[in-house]
Amino acid sequence: MKLLLLLAAAQAVASEHAQLRGVAPAKRAVYDAAVRTSAVFACLDGSKSIPASSINDDFCDCPDGSDEPGTAACLNGSFYCTNHGYVGATIPSSRVNDGVCDPECCDGSDEYLGVIDCLNVCAQVASSAKKARDEESAVRKKGLKTKREYIRYGAKEKALRSEKLKELESERRDVTSKVEELKAVKAEAEQYESHANAARALKEQQRERNMLPKKMANCEQLVQTLKDTNTKLNGRVSELKSILDHLATLREVEEGAAFEALLREKPILQETMSKFEEFKEKLSAAGDSADGTLVTPEVSPEVPDTSASEPSQLSDSDKIEDPDFDLCADPAATVVQCIFQSSNSLIKNVRRGLVYPFEWTGWFKIRTAVKNSYLGLTHSEELDVLRRDATKARKHLVDMENKQRDLDGKISAINNKEKMDFGPGNIWDKLYKECVTMDSFEYNYEVCFLENAKQRNIGGSGGTDLGSFTRWGPRDEGKKGADKYMYMMYENGAHCWNGPRRSVEVQLECGAENRIQAVSEPSKCEYVMRVQTPCACGDSAEDGAEDIPSHNEL
């Protein structure tokens, strides 16, 4: 009797278990209540109620398939694999007892009719999953460590840029003030230079004026020499002419044949007569006298008219005052004038010799050179030097303006970088413009963070522009639930033949290193790059690494 009762109880438990096969733990209470009370079962979609005995009877009664969680009767039903020792999984009911061991059901419970013998491999799967989780955890920890370094670097660089910007702006204000100061000094120096040039020109004119008497005497002496030389030459020309005239007379007196024979016998006479005729023709063409003598024009040395700017002749008082004009060498000067000039010059030279050491302008140059070499000039002294040297003043101004432009460039670069979005905590500051590459089939792909992306033929040069960084976020800006800092968009690349401009959506994943994981082209010239980087690593709650709970039910 007891044996019969035990068999009946076992049969009831087996029947109950069969009815609850394939039910997910979250829904088990609903099914369990219906089976234990033998009451009706309400379809989960609320469409109808059926007898509890209809659960898992291999006939689909409920429109939502909820009455057949453990059979393949309902096409839209679902079967829950318990997977003891690992993590439970849900598969479509159509895959129950289909003769295929589904990997999701590592315990083989989806093939309970024995059509195929599916081993329970959940222990091995759990071990592999744990190993994968450990590896992912190690990668995440390494990535998080690097990420924290990036964040510290970003914070430090931002503070340094702020401090550097203050220094540069302060320096620029100082340089701008110096530029304006040097502009004024340059104007003064050029004015001084202009006056100095005018003074030198006036002094040169005075020197030239003082030299005029000497030049006049030299010219008069040269004219007289030319006249004497001309007189001598004319005398020689007359002698030659008389000799040639004698030959001409001889030709007229002698009979023609006899003279011609003489010329043939003495060829030099023939040559001389011919050249004489040529000489007279040239003299006639040049307008000289018919007798062949040289006409000497009357030369009257004249002093250029400088009455508009200075007197044409030096007065006696000017001659006495002019140290470059020696009255004692002037025949027209009197003895008194000679003695007076010499005495006056002697007195001036003595006075100048006594005063000159104290008034010598070279002392300023020596003092400036010595102080600049050993002590350094004060700012005002340096400006005084520049006011007397326009060339140096211009150079100093150009140098200071170049420094001002250099500071403007540095300030602009810092301001532009400060406007950039380097992500949370300026984490991408460290990787700005850093490039990673990957070979994929015949192409090499390169992405430079926050800059540009390129595609090249492997082994080739140049490349195709895939776009420049434009924004954070996925290609589909309306994508819900997407963290924009997990995507980078590179747009406006090279035109695709008969298509759009090339663009790349970079999808960021947690990784211990920065590298391209994969590249695809789901649409024409619209690329997707999966890039691993420590910047994408979050804690376990952020990156979903703990979505699969650990089960130790082995």
Image: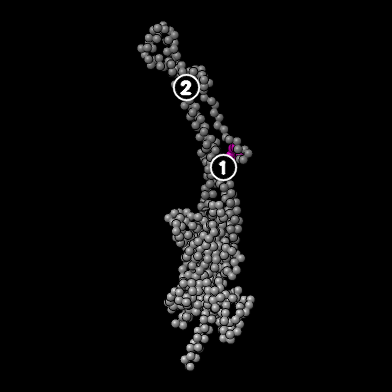
Q: Amino acid at mark 1?
A: Gln
Q: Name the residue rendered at 47%, 26% in the picture.
A: 229
Residue at the far left: name it. Answer: 265
Q: Name the mark on residue 285.
A: none
Q: Residue at x 52, y 62 (%)?
A: 528
Q: Nearer the viewer, residue 421 or 162?
A: 421
Label 1 close to label 2 by CB (< 8 Å): no
Q: Which residues are magenta?
A: 311-318
Q: In the rendered image, which quarter is residue 402 located in? A: bottom right
Q: Is residue 498 visible?
A: yes
For image coordinates 50% across by 20% down, the residue present is 283
Q: Is residue 441 magenta?
A: no
Secondary-structure class at tag 2: helix
Placement of the C terminus among the 4 image quadrants: bottom left
Q: Which mark is residue 205?
A: 1
Which residue occupies the foreground of this view, 445 or 342?
445
Q: Give coordinates of residue 216: x percent, y percent.
A: 53, 35
> Can you say whether 311 is above or below 61 in the image?
above
Picture quadrant where residue 500 is located: bottom right
- The kind of residue tagged 2 is Asn
Residue position marked by numbered label 2 in the rendering: 234
Neighbor class of circle 2 (other Cα within 10 Å; few <14, some 14-19, many 20+) is some
Q: Position of residue 433 (x, y in %)?
A: 51, 62
Above/below status of 174 relative to 223: below
Q: How many marks?
A: 2
Q: Nearer the viewer, residue 50 or 374?
A: 50
Q: Residue 281, percent across and down?
A: 49, 18
Looking at the image, is mark 1 or mark 2 earlier in the sequence?
A: 1
Q: Residue at x 53, y 74 (%)?
A: 72
Q: Main secondary structure of the magenta part?
A: loop
The answer to which quarter of the image holds residue 439 is bottom left
